Image (cartoon, rainbow, N blue to C red):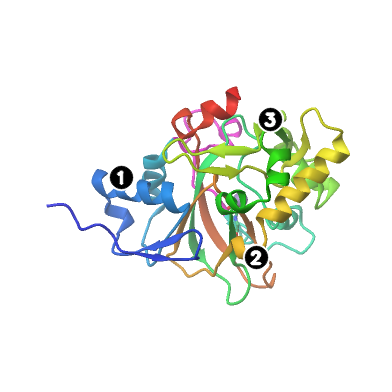
Amino acid sequence: MNAPAPRTVPLHPLFGVEVQDVELATVDDTGHARIRALFETHSVLLFRGQDLTDDDHMRLAERFGPIEDRNADERPKGEKMSVPSVSNIREDGSLTGEMDLHTLHLKANMLWHCDSTFMPQPALCNILIGRIVTRTGGETQLASTRAAWAQMPETLKARLRHVRLRHHYSHSRARISPELAALPMFHKWPAQSWPAVWRNPVNGAEALYVASHAYEVEGMDPKAGAGLIDEALEWATQSRFVFSHRWNVGDVLVWDQRAVLHRATPWNSSEPRKLTSLCVSATDEDGLAAMTMR
Ligand code: OGA
Ligand code: MN
């Protein structure tokens, strides 16, 4: 007999659920189908107290789709990718300094964004696991761009409904530091252009699709376009659309990049923090085909 459907507890009145009674290391196909259905509906899933190895993390991500591998070009052929981490801990165990380029890169994560909108195949989801967590600060915030779009005034909606935004990785980094933005890792991909609305093909729900990486609106004066992007971001990230997650070790947080913006929040830089992160790339079945054609 199949395991009973997991219990869910809302994280926020508009989106997100904590999923209980699931051991992610051992989910089977039926179990994953249930998780996937919850993902499509609620946009954010939280699983607590999970004991996942990096290999388990990879297996979980693979169930959602192709694992994103941003550094494939930098590794010797045949070498397996390792699970990336978002962390202020250096390899020797020391913590990165306030003005290190790496710290500045982490600061850029504090701008509202969706992952990988600057890549030809943007992300469907990110699966973050709490490994070393801070005592204070360091929450990850998530904003529902689905709820924000549904409640957006028609006048602003009309200005966004048929436009395409250009995204470039270096743009979000330039907001923090020109030196950071100049690094080759932020120039691997040419600018990508995406409609400002992503429609979920499973349930038809539309969501605003914008990020800190977006810098102009196609066919619009650059300054006016940047202004419209700012307006859209400002609307979508009002506190009523935001859920703040305080990390515990063993938390697994999965969010739908097509329906959620996210950002890290500051913490005391003398505290270590490490999350492991796997992004899964969006495929045509996730609505990417429609995003490319429109
Ligand atoms: C990410 C990210 C936020 C955080 O992993 O893509 O933005 O809280 N992380 O570290
Ligand atoms: Mn991110």
Which quadrant holds residue 219?
A: top right
Nearest the eye: 217 or 90: 217
Q: Is residue 69 magenta?
A: yes
Q: Which residue is mark 1?
A: 33
* Residue 59 place in picture, x, y as percent: 36, 44
Q: Is residue 189 magenta?
A: no
Nearest the eye: 99 or 192: 192
| Amino acid tagged 1 | Ala
Which quadrant holds residue 53?
A: bottom left
* Residue 50 place in picture, x, y as percent: 37, 63
Which quadrant holds residue 25?
A: bottom left
Q: Which residue is mark 2?
A: 239
Residue 112 in the figure: left or right of residue 8: right
- Disc 2 residue crowd, few under 14, some 14–19, many 20+, Cα 10 Å: few
Magenta stretch? Answer: 66-85
How far is the residue under mark 2 from the one under mark 1?
Answer: 32 Å
Q: Which residue is mark 3?
A: 193
